[in-house]
Structure formats: structure tokens, C-alpha cells
Image (spheres, rainbow, N blue to C red):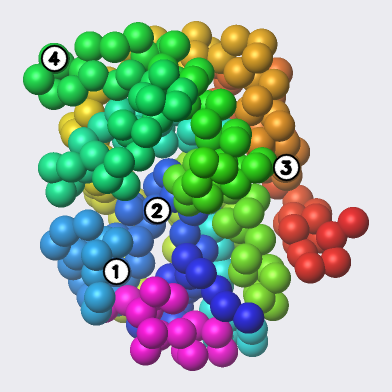
Amino acid sequence: MSFPGTWMTTSESMVYRVVPKCACSTIGQIMFYADNGAFFDGDIHDARHGMHKWGIEESQAQIASNVRAHNSYTFTCVRNPYTRILSAFFDKIAGIQRSGNRYRGKLVPSLAQKYGVQVGSPEDNFDFDQIKSFRRFLLFARDTIRFRRPIEPDIHWSPVSGHVSTLIHGGGRYDHIFWTEAFNDGMQTVLDNVSMAHPLNLSDVPRFNESEGHGPKRLHPVADYFDDLSMHLIYEIYQKDFELFRYDFENPANKMPIGEIDLDEVHLKLGPKAP
């Protein structure tokens, strides 16, 4: 079994299952600092030293052994499906990447041709109908997840529950799952349960948003992007995310959870013998 998206401090003080668009850059930088006494200079996703990652072949055996034996405090972070997919749209579809190019090369032109998604450009100050284009993108995202066409689902908009489940299927178990919307409280619980060579105060940690400033700003309240059809599509894609992580499907304007996460339920329903 493998553990994709799993990061571990070199000291093995903590194990984190990365979930894209859920504060992963900030969490990774905190883990890096805990062992190294400084933040990584650049995008933490590019770091090839100072941290174990499943994507680094030399780290895989150590991660697998640790996770299966549950030797370290293991956690992940989740996010409201409404705000997460909006973030994915503005970052990966409407935005320009750090490389100066569009995400995944020809993806955006293909979306324009097949789904009518328009996203503007830096030259026209990203002048486009955000609500209309987002709703068309949502149809594309649904097609990738439910029907795996016209492409395989992308990690940035595939369900959080799918990311979280891989560690459980590999034989791991979470000690803590917290919400991006209550980041400081959730991350503090992690830090309170681990030993760090270089302790840090969360209030002093910058938010590492690697996508910020490379695309259009969201012009409307979250709820304005979701009509009845959009909400239907969102529930079709993210039903498990709403139910397991206690988010409010009925009210897109409410980004906060409406209940507590039950870890036993998460392990039962996302495990290999899920009912």
C-alpha cells in the first residue's frame, strides 16, 4: 500500500496527509520550521530536503513504516466544499501560475472550447463574468469526478474525503482532523501533542498562500456563485465531505462547520470495509 500526499517531519514528530486547497502550504512550512528552525525559502511543495514526503522515493519506506505502526501524531486539515472549489477555480483555472503559464498547459483553452468557460487575462485585468464561468467550470469538475472525462479528476477539486481516505486504506489512523476555517485552534492542538526541536507561536506564522496575487480577485459573495443547479452539482460531488466534516450544504454563505468531526465515523466510512 502507498501513502500519496503524506508528509512527515524528519524527526518523525508528526505525519500530515496533504489536502490541496486546505492550508497545505502553511502546514508544510510549520512542519519544516519545527525541525529546521526556519521556514523553507520558496514554495514548500518544491522542498526536497528537510522533510519526508511520499513523492521523494528515499522517504517512502520510512513514511510507510511509521504510518502503519502509528508511531507519530497523525493529522490532516479539511475545508468547506463551496469555498474550496471556488478557490480552485480562481487559482488553477482563472489564475496564472508561478511559472507564468496557465495551469496544465492546454486545459484552460480546452475549457473555453468545450464548456464555454471564459477567464480573461492579465492584459484585460481578468475581465469576465465570474459567476457564469464558474458555474460552467463546476459542470466540468463534476464530469471529471463522476465520469473521469474529459480528463481524470484533478487533486485541487477532487473530494477531500478521497484524499483523506488514502492514509486509512494504507493502514494509518488519524489522531486529529481540523477545519481550515478554525486553523489556529486546530493546528494548536497538533502542536500541543508533539515535541518540536524549534517551537513556534502560531500567531507569528505568516499564511503561505502560494497562489495569491496571480489571478483575479473574487468579486462576489460565495453564495452568489451557487444557484439551485450548482448546489445540486456540489452535493453530487461532495456529499461525503459535507457529511463527514460537518459542513452546511443548505447555506453556501456559511463557511463554518455545524458540528464536530467524529474520527471513528471518518475511519469507518472512509476505510477499506466502508459500509
Q: Quadrant of the C terminus?
A: bottom right
Q: Which residue is mark 2?
A: 24
- The amino acid pointed to by label 4 is Asp
- The amino acid pointed to by label 2 is Cys
Mark 3 or mark 4: which is in front? Answer: 4
Label 3 or label 4, whichever comes before in sequence order? 4
| Few, some or many residues within 10 Å of mark 2 (<14, 14–19, 20+) | many
Please report the residue visible at 69 percent of the width from the left and 77 percent of the height from the top.
171
Q: Are marks 1 and 3 in contact (CB under 8 Å)?
A: no
Mark 1 or mark 4: which is in front? Answer: 4
Q: Is residue 125 left or right of residue 140?
A: left
The part of the chain drawn in magenta is 50-65
Label 1 or label 2, whichever comes before in sequence order? 2
Quick one: SS at disc 4?
helix
Label 2 or label 3, whichever comes before in sequence order? 2
Q: Which residue is mark 1?
A: 32
Q: Is residue 88 magenta?
A: no
Q: Marks 1 and 4, Cα distance to the nearest angstrom?
A: 39 Å
Label 4 or label 2, whichever comes before in sequence order? 2
Residue 240 is marked as 3
Label 1 or label 4, whichever comes before in sequence order? 1
Please report the residue visible at 74 percent of the width from the left and 58 percent of the height from the top.
270
Quick one: SS at disc 1?
helix
Depth check: give the residue in front, 22 or 258: 22
Q: Are marks 2 and 3 in contact (CB under 8 Å)?
A: no
Mark 4 or mark 2: which is in front? Answer: 4
Q: Are marks 1 and 4 in contact (CB under 8 Å)?
A: no
Q: Which residue is mark 4?
A: 124
Please report the residue visible at 29 percent of the width from the left and 69 percent of the height from the top.
32
Q: Is residue 139 left or right of residue 220?
A: right
**Can residue 185 be seen in the rendering of this structure?**
no
